[in-house]
Image (tube, helix red, strand yellow):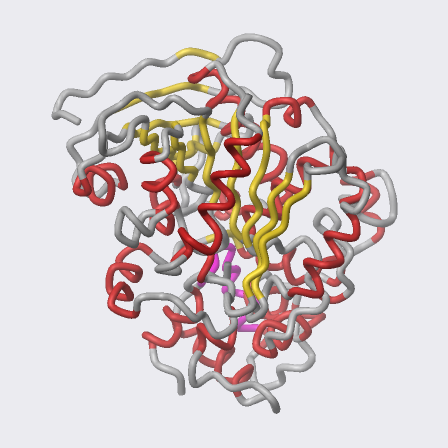
Amino acid sequence: MLNFSSVLTLFVLFFVSPNVLAIDKVFPGNAKDVDIIIKSSVSDDDDIICKSLVQTQGYACEEHKVTTKDGYILSVQRIPVGRSGKTASKPPVLLQHGLLVDAAAWLLNTPDESLGFILADNGFDVWLANTRGTKYSRGHTSLSSNDSAYWEWSWDELVQYDLSALVQYVQYKTGQKLHYVGHSLGTLIALAAFSEQGKLINMFKSAALLSPIAHLNQIPSQLTKEAAQLHIAEGVIYWQLHQFNSFPWFDKQELYSLGYRQFPPGWDVLGPILEKICNEPGTNCSELMTALTGPNCCINSSRAGELLKHEPQPTATKNIIHLSQSKVIRTGTIAMYDYGSEDEKKEYYGQSDPPAYNMKDIPKELPLFLGYGGQDMLADANDVKALLNDLKDHDNGELVEVYSEEYAHADFVLGVNASQVVYDPMISFFDNHSS
């Protein structure tokens, strides 16, 4: 039986004063897609990202709250100046983390190795997003995170509501278009939003996509494939027991009564699942992080304790299901959530198939920087090449790729040499598109 520490490893990267100042106003202008409630605050709570991870390194930091149209209250951190104290002279940059982590992932290494600090020291106005459901973004205008309705979302809602709210908020606060950095799931929601060519697209100067996961049907991670092909989330946690015939060792009636909407659920559920997956032929779970993400070359193992103070973070089970659906991992097609029956799909979408996000519809003039690695077992190089093929008609000079043969999935965020391998060329790319 796998132990609890192994489970934690599995889910990692499955990529100011005591006075409180609050300013609340409804976002003005022509924002029709989202309603943004702006609240800037300073807290003396030690258990916040600004106080625990940023100010301790000698940087100024602001805590912000953004409320989406569907009522989720998102935590955002701003690093407005670098260690020099000079006001940012370059445009804002919004950093969006991946699955089962939060904004802390951008700050866990030393200031010379962590992207959040590196960007601030290079003159950028840095904004750190935290996805709904993570520790600091658990608020809602009418729901508790203990309510099952709170967890009724997938990455479709991150595209429609979270990203829209965050981008419009940053532009409102700074008066500028922004650069974007996404890792893993943070790349998928950006690409989906770009493909829809809404008003949001005009708020970006450029976007950097690290370990992009648009196409997922060629992932070499046997562990991830087994989980997807066996419909783990559907069968165990989300009541879709009709798809669970491959697991006779589970009491289906008991599972039906569980009704887990938050992922990961308790160890009593995860233990048998992981044991089943790891007993599948060809699956080696002795090193679960490697089994999931690939052999990361450049992570400082001494930071593992700090990492586990902040990760893994929860997400919605529906989000996990969406990622593992046939439209994503099983065939590589990028589509909205598949509700199963034709009647439900027609009710939600007015058609028998979920609408697709077509990567070829991304505007060819949008500057894009793609960083990917030869050892990445989630953002497989062949899948990234399929994405690059979708983008082949991009304007000359507006599509830049950086490939590292030795990098795996987590190296792009936690690699001690990522500054030299990825961040330096990315910052040069931003500088070339900051006018």
Q: Is residue 403 visible?
A: yes
**Residue 6 falls in which quadrant of the image?**
bottom left
Residue at 47% across, 34% down: 94
Q: Is residue 37 magenta?
A: no
Left or right: 167 as drawn, with respect to 51: right
* Residue 355 can be seen in this image: no
Check if residue 263 falls in the magenta segment.
Answer: yes
In the figure, is residue 215 to the left or right of 290? right
Q: Residue at x 45, y 70 (%)?
A: 296
Residue 247 screen position, x and y as percent = 62, 82
Task: Name the residue rendered at 29%, 54% in the picture.
Answer: 109
Q: Quadrant of the C terminus?
A: top right
- How many numbered circles does the render carry? 0
Image quarter of the N terminus: bottom left
Locate residue 413: give its quadrant: bottom left
Vertically, is 108 above or below 202?
Answer: below
Q: Nearer the viewer, residue 139 or 399?
A: 399
* Range shown magenta: 253-264
Residue at 32 percent of width and 31 percent of height? 79
